[in-house]
Amino acid sequence: MNTDTYAQAAIEADPTLPIIRVTRDFRATPAQLAKAHLDPDLYLRWVGPDGITSRSTVWDARNGGEWAYVSEHEGQEFRFRGCFHTVSDDLIIQTFTYEGMPDDVSLETLRFVDLGDGRTRLEAQSLCESIESRDAWLRSGMEEGVIDGYAKLDRLLDSGEVSA
């Protein structure tokens, strides 16, 4: 494992638009980050806060495909689903729905920017239904899930299990 400190995610809410932006640098190539987001066996190992387990119910990672998974934590189930609109080595555009709030669908854009020297910046943007919906997401523990999840992704990348 590398000994330098892992990066922290910058999570920002646009003050005038229902948008959340997340920026995070990784010691990985764009192709490795794309694979970690598109391969369900990898994705479900790192997504979300510590202490959850997740399983895929549908996963078709291609332009026009769909995805769905269930996360379990302390006896509760949380279901998520969406559609892949664009899938490539440096860009994923998808919808995201938490089934506990089925009318609040977000449009997510994830860009993997090659910084050189084996480093990549993830630039993610979630366009939410409304500012109120965005703020509910931020209050829901999203920040903890992002920070914990990316720390797990760092460990998965360091282990060499995510080949390009």
Image (cartoon, rainbow, N blue to C red):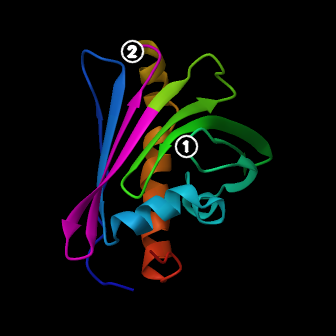
Instruction: Give the labeled residue for mark 1.
Output: 63
> Is residue 15 depicted above or below 119 in this figure?
above
Image coordinates of residue 13 in percent, x first then y, are 30, 28
Image coordinates of residue 50 in percent, x first then y, are 57, 58
Residue 145 in sight from this viewpoint: yes
Which quadrant of the structure image shows residue 127? top left
Q: Residues within 10 Å of mark 2 (few under 14, many from 20)?
A: some
Q: Residues within 10 Å of mark 1 (few under 14, many from 20)?
A: some
Instruction: Give the labeled residue for mark 2.
Output: 131
Which quadrant of the structure image shows residue 38? bottom right
Mark drawn on residue 91 = none
Q: Nearer the viewer, residue 132 or 105?
A: 105
**Residue at coordinates 44% horizontally, 22% vertically from top-left?**
128
Write the start and end of the magenta stretch as one range: 108-130
Instruction: Give amino acid for label 2.
Output: Ile
**Residue at coordinates 69% horizontally, 28% vertically from top-left?**
99
Q: Which image quarter holds the N terminus? A: bottom left
Judge whether residue 119 is colored magenta.
yes
> Is residue 77 depicted above or below 56 in this figure?
above
**Residue at coordinates 66% horizontally, 55% vertically from top-left?**
52
> Is residue 123 depicted above or below 164 in this figure?
above
Q: Are marks 2 and 1 in contact (CB under 8 Å)?
A: no
Furthest residue in direction left, as rendered = 116
Question: Circle 1 — which element?
Answer: loop
Question: Circle 2 — which element?
Answer: helix
